[in-house]
Amino acid sequence: MSHAYPLHVYVSRYTKEALLNIVDLHHNTHEPFNTLFEQVASLPYSLLLDTSGSLKSDGRYNIMAFSPVSVIEAKGDKVTLVDVSTSKREALLQRPFEAVEQHLHSQLNNVVINADFDTSHLPFIVGVAGMAGYDTGRFYEALPSVAKDDYATPDFTVGLYLRSLIEDTQTGHIYYCSVDNAPLTSFFAAPDSSKKVTTDTAPSDFKLTTPFTSNLSKHEYEKSLATIGGYLRAGDCYQVNMAQRFTASYEGNIWQAYCELRNQNQAPFSAYFNLPNGCIASISPERFLRVKDGIVETKPIKGTRPRFKNPSKDKASADSLLSAEKDRSENLMIVDLLRNDISKHCKPHSVKVPALFALESYEAVHHLVSTVTGELNETASPLELLAAAFPGGSITGAPKIRAMEVIDELEPHRRNIYCGSVFYMGYREDMDSSICIRTVLAENNRLHCWAGGGIVLDSVPSEEYQETLDKVSKILPVLESINQ
């Protein structure tokens, strides 16, 4: 079904070029994009990058990628190249992002587009995509190993995708992109088909089988904040992002849970990634790094207030965030950290801050968001930029390495996908990536979901604890209510 062969199979022996066919399906399908993805959602490595209908970002395109040729996987201190069609595994010496560059992205050097319309506006098309969990940072920095790693899901999984579907939400057009020219019906039911999933083959309904419980009690969480306060006063660091993990048992179809979460949150950097050992359902509001036409952009979030149904209370909550010195200081620390991180691979004097302390309001919370931009060096790859800035400073603290050491000391479990990134880089080296906050990991019939906040000297422990609950107020209750 996958027709997944090495890229050279599709490259002409004479031209040494891979023909990339792009077809506009606008007149051939009327199915919603998510309904189309549902047909491949259970396949290994199927990935949906989903703006969720959000109007809160410049997100215009939804992308689904499926049936990758090869995958780079990393877990612990091991990096592996996986041939998806044969399941052959090869141990690699490179670190994860470098392995993706050398073994996956390098295969896309000779691509020629075959289309009867302008395709320059389309993102990704074909290329590398997947996830880098928070603990990918351990390949790039020497960090302690105190927190428990109890996950089946790898720390890093990125595939080379030679076919995709892209939806332009402004026009309603859906484009099928394929290097191997495999017919769309190899993966999807024929457009407007009446084919239905039978009761015997349909996945069972999602539901929780136990309540969510945290790996830290309120007392333990606030005790950890007191320890962080000591480090802050000693000058070890200026800010530390401290999180707790909520876990529940579940049964049934995680795709169903994702659809409910995305509909209720409408987060612009939502994603669904089905892995052999687990599944990621992210409803993140936060961009990490984008590279387009050589311009780098990052949009750190730091500063949160709850939403209210009462308009007056809601406005007061937003106004209090905009005027809060603590949150503005917190945001500024991370802006400075990210300016430093991206400047390593940007042209001298090109890094700017065009927006500082902007308000963005989502279904559950108001956020304080800033924007940092720069011009990528001609000699730098977007993947080099991503590796150098990983993990994102908005979810570590400052200075980054010391903050990460404190996180490992105080959080009982490693983070895996939480505070990592779901990202793509197309063959034209256009890249976009999220910070995986508001994210659920499903594996072994358990769901994990995290929430944290940046701790600074004037943080009030009880308020910081409440902020973590505010951040999952449109996640845990939603999951608890499905099919109950």
Image: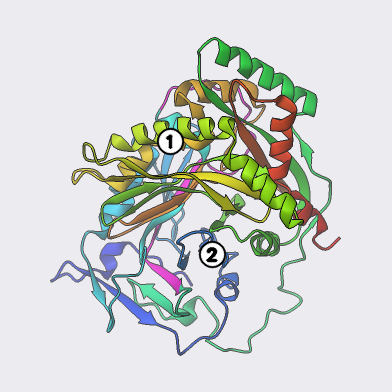
Instruction: Tell me residue 175's x, y (percent).
Output: 41, 77
**Drawn side of residue 223 relative to residue 110, left or right:** right
Eyeballing the image, is 448 above or below 457?
below
Q: Which residue is mark 1?
A: 335
Instruction: Tell me residue 397's x, y (percent).
Output: 51, 28
Residue found at x 31% / y 47%? 382
Which quarter of the rendering shows the C terminus? bottom right
Furthest residue in direction top, as rendered: 234
Residue found at x 46% / y 33%? 332
Corner quadrant of residue 173? bottom left
**Which color scheme does this rendered protein use?**
rainbow
Q: Which mark is residue 14?
A: none
Instruction: Tell me residue 283's x, y (percent).
Output: 60, 54
Eyeballing the image, is 370 above or below 460?
below
Tell me the amino acid under the disc marked 1: Val
Q: Secondary structure at mark 2?
A: loop
Does 296 lie within the magenta span?
no
Mark pair 1, 2: CA separation: 24 Å
Residue found at x 36% / y 63%? 124
**Drawn side of residue 330 relative to residue 19, left or right:** right
**Drawn side of residue 313 relative to residue 233, left or right:** right
Q: Which residue is mark 2?
A: 55
The answer to the question of whether label 1 and label 2 lie on touching residues, with beta carbons closer than 8 A, is: no
Does residue 300 appear anywhere in the picture? yes
Earlier-in-chain disc, 1 versus 2: 2
Eyeballing the image, is 482 above or below 322?
below
Start and end of the magenta stretch? 141-167
Tell me the amino acid under the disc marked 2: Leu
Q: Secondary structure at mark 1?
A: helix
Does residue 77 appear anywhere in the picture? no
